[in-house]
Amino acid sequence: MVTIKFFASLREEIGKEMVFELMDGTVEVTKNKNPCVAYLDAEKVVMPLIIRNAKPGDRFQPLGVKGSQKLKEFFIDHKIPRFERSKIPLLISGERIVWVVGHRIDECARISDRTKKILKVMLV
């Protein structure tokens, strides 16, 4: 198994860093209970990845949900206070939100039986 790690500093914005680790798809990924870690299908992710805050009108398809949802509605449904929403980073792939960091990944980036490469993203 080959592991490649990349780092992105968010120290000025939120005082944290993101670590990106590319792993072989044969690695067994158990149910993730750590909200600061996301496992994405690396082949479904478009590079370069961008980290940004929410913009008005942002939409994504939360894992396990049919159809897309406005990010604002997601925050309201999950009782995330308005003052905290601007502090939540989003991981963007192409034009899609693939991870609302600390909360939910997008259905399009989920790992499946056909996944060959896994991108592990950690907020540290």
Image: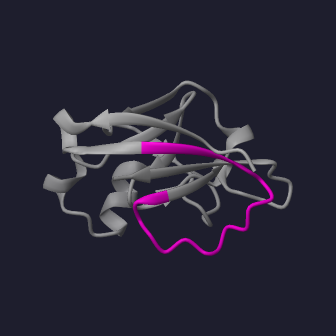
Color encoding of the figure:
one colour
Residue at position x 32%, y 39% in the image: 54
Report x, y in % for residue 15: 19, 44
Residue at position x 41%, y 66% in the image: 35
Does 10 sit left or right of 68 as displayed? left
Residue at position x 18%, y 55% in the image: 84
| Quadrant position of residue 77 | bottom left
Most common SS among magenta residues: loop
Query: Which residue is more in the foreground, 24 or 54?
Result: 24
Let me know if residue 4 appears in the view: yes
Report x, y in % for residue 26: 80, 59
Let me know if residue 52 appears in the view: no
Where is 110 relative to 2, above or below? below
Residue at position x 44%, y 52% in the image: 122
Report x, y in % for residue 8: 38, 34
Q: Name the residue furthest left.
A: 83
Q: Name the residue furthest right.
A: 114
Query: Which residue is more in the foreground, 61 or 93?
Result: 93
- Magenta part of the protein: which range? 19-37
Q: Is residue 28 magenta?
A: yes
Report x, y in % for residue 37: 47, 59
Could you tell me how many numbered marks the image carries?
0
Q: Is residue 65 magenta?
A: no
Query: Which residue is more in the foreground, 2 or 73?
Result: 2
